[in-house]
Image: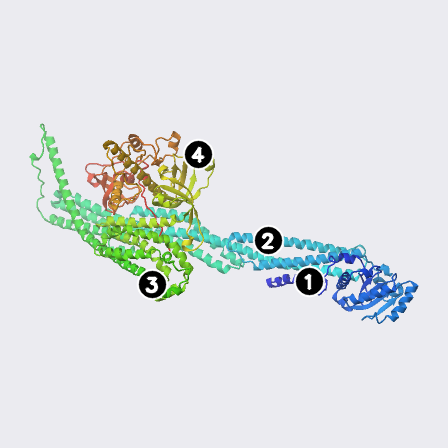
Amino acid sequence: MSMSEIWIVLCSSHKAPDEIMHQDIIPLYAADIQDQLKKQFAYLSGGRGGDGCPVITFPDYPAFSEIPEKEFQNVLTYLTSIPSLRDAGIGFILVIDRRQDKWTSVKASILRIAASFPGNLQLVLVLRPTGFFHRALSDIAFRFNRDELKMKVPIIMLGSVSELQGYIDKTQLTEDLGGTLDYCHNRWLSRRTAIEGFAQKVKQTAQILQSFGTELAETELPNDVQSTSSLLATHTEKKDKMKEDIRVAVEQGDDILGSITKPVTENPEYKLNQDQLDNQTTVERLLAQLHETETAFDEFWIKHQQKLEQCLRLRNFEQDFREVKAALDIVSERLSAFSDVGNSRSHVEHILKDLANFEEKSHETVAKARMLASERDAFIQSNHYAVDSIIPKCSELHHLCDAFTTETERRRNLLNKSLELHDLLEKSMKWCDEGIYLLASQPVDKCQSQDGAESALQEIEKFLDTGAGNKIKELNKIYREYAHILNEDLKEHVQKVFQKQESMEEMFQKRQVSLKKLAAKQTRPVQPVAPRPEAFVKSPCTSPGLQRENVSSSESSALRRVNYRKAKSEMTELHQSRGGSTMDDEENLAVLRQHVMNELIETERAYVEELLCVLEGYAAEMDNPLMAHLISPELQNKKDILFGNMEEIYHFHNRIFLRELETYVEYPELVGRCFLDQMEDFQIYEKYCQNKPRSESLWRQFSDSVFFQECQRKLDHKLSLDSYLLKPVQRITKYQLLLKEMLKYSKNCEGAEDLQEALTSILGILKAVNDSMHQIAITGYDGNLNELGKLLMQGSFNVWTDHKKGHTKVKDLARFKPMQRHLFLHEKAVLFCKKREENGEGYEKAPSYSYKHSLNMAAVGITENVKGDAKKFEIWYNAREEVYIVQAPTPEVKATWVNEIRKVLTSQLQACREASQHRTLEQTQSLPLPLPASSCASPSRNHIRNTKKMEEKKADLTSLEGCGTAVAPKYPEKGKGWAKASHSLDASEENDGWSSAEEPLNSSDAEEEGGGGGGEIKLTPGKYTVVTDYDKGVSEEFTVKSGDLVQLIREGEDGLWFVKNLSSGREGWIPANNLLMLIGNSKSAQSLSSSESGTASSNLSTSSSCSDSCNVSSTSFSDIKG
């Protein structure tokens, strides 16, 4: 049976029970007129006439005339509705028993029945009174009143029961009429009530099933797993209740049917009368209808349940699909980070190792995705209704997995190819170094003879033969073979190696030509002339043996000097041969700088034009009286909200910044100064970005306004106004990209430092804008946020509390789960807020932050390292009365926050130091001095620059004297932070930290703690292997990577060392303390210059906390998106 057929059955099943009674208007039920039926002034015994007419008996009822008309009509209407339509259509036989009554009563009864009987009449039989007088009277009266009693059917006056039996069979008459029909009025009434109640039950059940079926049919399938599961459970519960109701109804019908057939069951010869047979038929029909309805509902439910289960399976699949796809997107994004092909062999090997680890970690995600995609066949086999939407998702997962696997293999092949190239380059460089060393080590005196020259030629030829497997043969072939991995840096490295190889081969050719000439000449070898004896300091007792030894040593020294000069001259030739390439590089960089400068000026002009166009085409038109009729009343006087301070931005760029930029068009490398001079004016963007949410909300409300459409038409703009309102946000983020490009091509130029400072300042403005967008979303703070000083950092963290304030300690320590808190670090306080996501679109969807509590920075301390987690640090308050364990998303974020907090505390220390010095001078000189500037005031640009330089050069913080604060050494012991001297033993050992509001430390104690009792570590010249990356040298372009080989050349002033990166060939200055961190425990390698004087090695070590002190702080900024 189809769903439509099932539905038709459900919709029509509730109509059948009404057919039990045939009233056209409102059906009557025995239960409704039970009291009236109990009077038994008329009853339907179940007897039938000769042609099957139902017999209604009116027994002798003395109070017949007193029966209310309404009751009389109800009983007659009900009795005539019981027989079937066919039997009722033939007509009823009325038996009126008036044997004990008077003629006047008989007449009245007949007239009343004739007037009120609702059905068809076949025959009226009247048992007249039995008394002689009344009998005679009835005969006479009936003759004279025949017309008055005239009815549509014949009325027969009978004198006895025997005469009645002549019209109706004895078996169809009850015992009171002389018949044998078994009839009990109370039993009949009880059975009729039960049958009609059962019919009502069947009807109600059918109606409930229909209503439930309608609900099921009209139910929309949910879009999530939880709602679908809940809906399936709810519908199943309702279905079970429906089934229970049907079971109860069936039991009720079976009981009624059993009571009807009970006489036949007890006495097989017993025959049911027609009414009993009709009742049996009715109950059986109701039971059959109930079973049919139940069967149809079961079929409908099975299909509905299957659909819900399929929906639940689909929602689970979709949820798994979203999770797996998100995981695949993450691993794919992480895989895209493996774009670097490496700058050395060790670097490539390190990347390959990382790629293998990444692939292993990603295997579970890929396997889960493939398993989910394999469910496609199961969905198809189960005839799932949404198979058309499932198959594309499975195909997408297969595609993503295959793409990830393919991309991983491609990256591995690229790295293997890069490793192969670096092997070739290292072989070539090693071969070149060996060749140069060979040329430098050939004795000049021996080469003057023919044998010496031939021997030297053989050495050279033998060495050149080894070049077949070591040198680069064709540069273009290398370019073709490794084209897919050659980036600019690697290509430059290949060129330099090839140039070095060519220069070395050219040197060998020149040496070969010279040696061949010497080998061809038959001249005496030139004997070296010993130095004059006066050149030596003679000992008072010099023996001949010692004299010869001194002479031999002098000759050896002279030969070494000759070889050194020759090698130096050859190296000079090598550098000169590479000089042309360096000049070409400088010219290329100049062209690139000019290109960036042109883009900066052209885009700036376009930006100014766009701002002017918006201000004239939209903002000015809002004040135009001719356009006022197009502006809705709600939009009027909202210009400042919609456009913010765009006009102020336009005037700054048009009148000042663009003109200043154009003055640097010939000197692009100096453009950083232009940005620095105008940096304060860029603060106006913060106000614009803070107004952007209000502007965007207003635009969404009136974006369909006729005014805006008319303005756009006049301007002939393809984009609507909101795209142009986003221009200032996009422009301020564009500057940092252009500055990065300019800095990339200007590292060795005069203005590199200004470019770097300008880039840092622009990033700082972007960060301030971003932070301010979060700050304005803080709710619940009673005070003025501006009084807390500048907002330095903001971010989301996991926070645990570990307070030690009496009874609250147990409660707080019981908090095992972290609190999600958004921290705002100001100069004077740190705020703890709870992030709340908001509904909406665009800026309206931005989160808000509910203020929870704050800590005054004057009483704050930090512990930088928490045991067991590199991402955790502690913020404690009032001598550790309140301790907050903060977990950052990454170790880098933690390092940035710790450094920023340290700067705040250091500035407080500095302010305290200046205040102490001021008080000391006042006490000493008794002269009034001006108070020092607040530590919160923003320093000048030169002061910031000088401070940065001092921070790079200084290794330790100076201990403050005469002030209530102190700073521990820069390199504390491992596992310890910045400790308070006055803490108890437990507190100091368990939670060492750093605070600007602590008791002073004795300077000698601080030195012992920092030194660790091991004495000062000394650096010596030599070669070392770098153990960690470093890009903060004094020279911007000098960087080293883990695995690079560096040579310490000499020590300079201010604790700086001049270092050469032997892997890249670059040189630069590095602070000694940073150098200790870089080389770690690596041992010095043997240098070429020390080959004759012995091996010089140096085993350096540093404290394990050095790396903690040398964290490179960097501030991340999320681009503002409209």
Task: Report x, y in % for residue 645.
Answer: 33, 55
The disc at residue 617 is 3
Residues at badges 4 and 3 in contact (C-beta under 8 Å)? Answer: no
Discs 4/3, front:
3
Discs 1/4, front:
4
Alpha carbons under labels 2 and 1: distance apart: 27 Å
Discs 3/2, front:
3
Q: Secondary structure at mark 2?
A: helix
Name the residue furthest right. Answer: 132
Of marks 2 and 1, which one's residue comes earlier in the chain? Answer: 1
Front residue of 439/635: it is: 635
In the rendered image, which quarter is residue 852 located in?
top left
Residues at badges 3 and 1 in contact (C-beta under 8 Å)? Answer: no
Q: Quadrant of the C terminus?
A: bottom left
Q: In the picture provided, is 301 more to the left or to the right than 652?
A: right
Front residue of 233/571: it is: 233
Discs 4/2, front:
4
Residues at badges 3 and 2 in contact (C-beta under 8 Å)? Answer: no
